[in-house]
Every structure is written in structure tokens, then in C-alpha cells.
Amino acid sequence: METDTTKIPKLEKGAVARGEALIRVRNVSKVFKFRKGEVHALRNISVDLMCGEYLSIMGPSGSGKSTLFNMIGALDVPTSGTVQIGPLDLPKLSSRQLAYVRCNYIGYIFQSYNLLPSLTALRNVALARVYTGVSDHEAEESAKRCLEQVGLGNRLHHRPDEMSGGQQQRVAIARALVNDPSILLADEPTANLDFKTGGDVINILKELSITNGVTIITATHDHKMLKNSDRVLWIRDGAIDHIDNRDDLHIDEGAISSLGGGETLEELLK
């Protein structure tokens, strides 16, 4: 029997060549309406995000970066405009179809890990695979491979309270990878980690972008992310301020020169 999810085009891994546009955002605006007024979170944003790239979205609090992040991740729909991932036009999909896209094509890494405290690392990761309809055995085999890939092959049967913050974030990365997504979205993935552990997580994400061919998009305030980014998208007041290629940035500890501007990180995030 044909279901709602069988009616959408399939996003086959490798169907879009590395370096070609995988995500197309066109004229996207988002307005939140309240009883006493409205907030324009995004204002007519258009941008192409390339297959296999590592993109960091930077901006001050309230700039709209989280809203844009949610649009790309099929977590919200625009008031106007469109977001396309390969052949998928997200605003035209039903809630059930969007859930299918999130489960099968996009992996999510959250600032607070969001692990189930009563489950081991293996079961936390396997559960995301079970939701796609595979057997428990197959799910655990996939989970084991992903945990080994992030260096946690010796922590399979540890619960979150038996692991450090960095190890918990690695479990979260493995969970995001277990369904072999085309896109990995990381929301402030280093915010709760110390300098060294945060750097380790950033290096893991960069390695995944190279070895797995996954497109990585981060929303972040962490300037360490910029060193591994292919491009940096700066957003301000709901609009794209500018986009830098990695080679356009000169990054020192605590300061960034962008296109010769010489601004500090604090100035860029105001």
C-alpha cells in the first residue's frame, strides 16, 4: 500500500556531487506572530549550501541563525520562500514526510547531548536506527560501527553518567551518524565542553565531512569551529551579512580578520 512517505522523491547518497549545491534556500522569510505584534526572524534569505562542505553559521544572539538552522534541518517551515534538499521541497511536505526526512536524511547533534540516561551508549545510538524499521540486531551492529568510528569502541556498555562530557558528545555524534545521513546539523556542539575536548569534537566533525562525505552545518559562537570550516555564513538581524571562504579568514586566538576588516570576534558577533 502506498504511504505518505513513499510519495516523496528519494535523496540517494551520492546523487549530488561533492561541491555542487545540495541545499538551496530561496527568498526565505520567517515571521513569528504574537498577540501584541510580530517578529521578523528571517528576512528574504537566499543561499546555496554545497554537498560535502563544512559550513559554520555565526551571529549574535537573536540574529536568526537558530531559525535558519531549523529551516535547513526540516524542524520548521518558512512563512515564505522555499528550502530544497536535493529533490525535496521541504515546505511542500506533510508533517509525516518531514519526519521521514529528519529520520533518514539528516543527523542532529545538540548542545546538551540529549542522551537517554537509563540506556547504554550502544542502545542510545541503536534506538535512532530502530526507528527506521530495522531489527534490533542490525541496529546494534550499525551503532557499534559508529561508536567505534568516534573512538568509543571501549565504552559501548557505559551509561551517560559513567562518561565524561566529551564522551557523551561523541555518543551524540555516533547517534547522528547511524542512519548514514547526507546532512549533519550541529547546534553549538562544543558549548558545554572544555577547550581541548571541544577541539577534539571539532576535529571529529571535520574528519566525518571528509571520510563520510557528509555535509556539516553548525550554528556556533565558537571561533575554533572556523578553523575547520570551508565557509562561514555571518547572519545579522535576520539577513545574511556576508559569507567568507576559509582562505578569507585570518584566525588568531580570540580575534578574527574577515576580508581584511580586522574585527575581533566580539565585534563580529555584536
Image: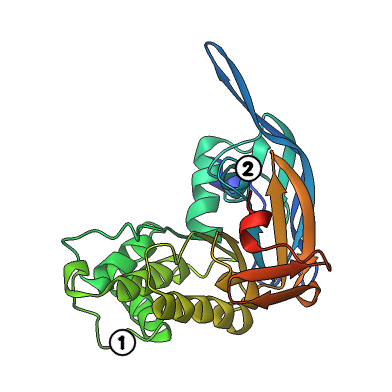
User: Is 77 left or right of 137, judged from the image as shown?
Assistant: right
- 163 left or right of 24? left
Q: Nearer the viewer, residue 249 or 93?
A: 249
In this rendering, the answer to whether 106 lies above or below 27 is: below
On the image, which quarter does residue 115 sit in? bottom left
Disc ID at residue 63: 2
At label 1, which amino acid type do we have? Answer: Gly
* Camera sees residue 61: yes
Q: Image point 57% across, 35% down: which residue? A: 94
What residue do we see at 31% from left, 76% from top?
167
Calculate the distance from the C-alpha at mark 2 to the C-alpha at mark 1: 39 Å
- Residue for badge 1: 153
> How many numbered discs, if any?
2
- Residue 252, horizontal then vertical, whole percent: 64, 77
Q: Residue 238 in the image: state x and y as whole percent.
A: 69, 39
Q: Is residue 209 left or right of residue 258?
A: left
Residue closest to the eye, 39 or 45: 39
> Residue at point 65% right, 43% down?
90
Q: Nearer the viewer, mark 2 or mark 1?
A: 2
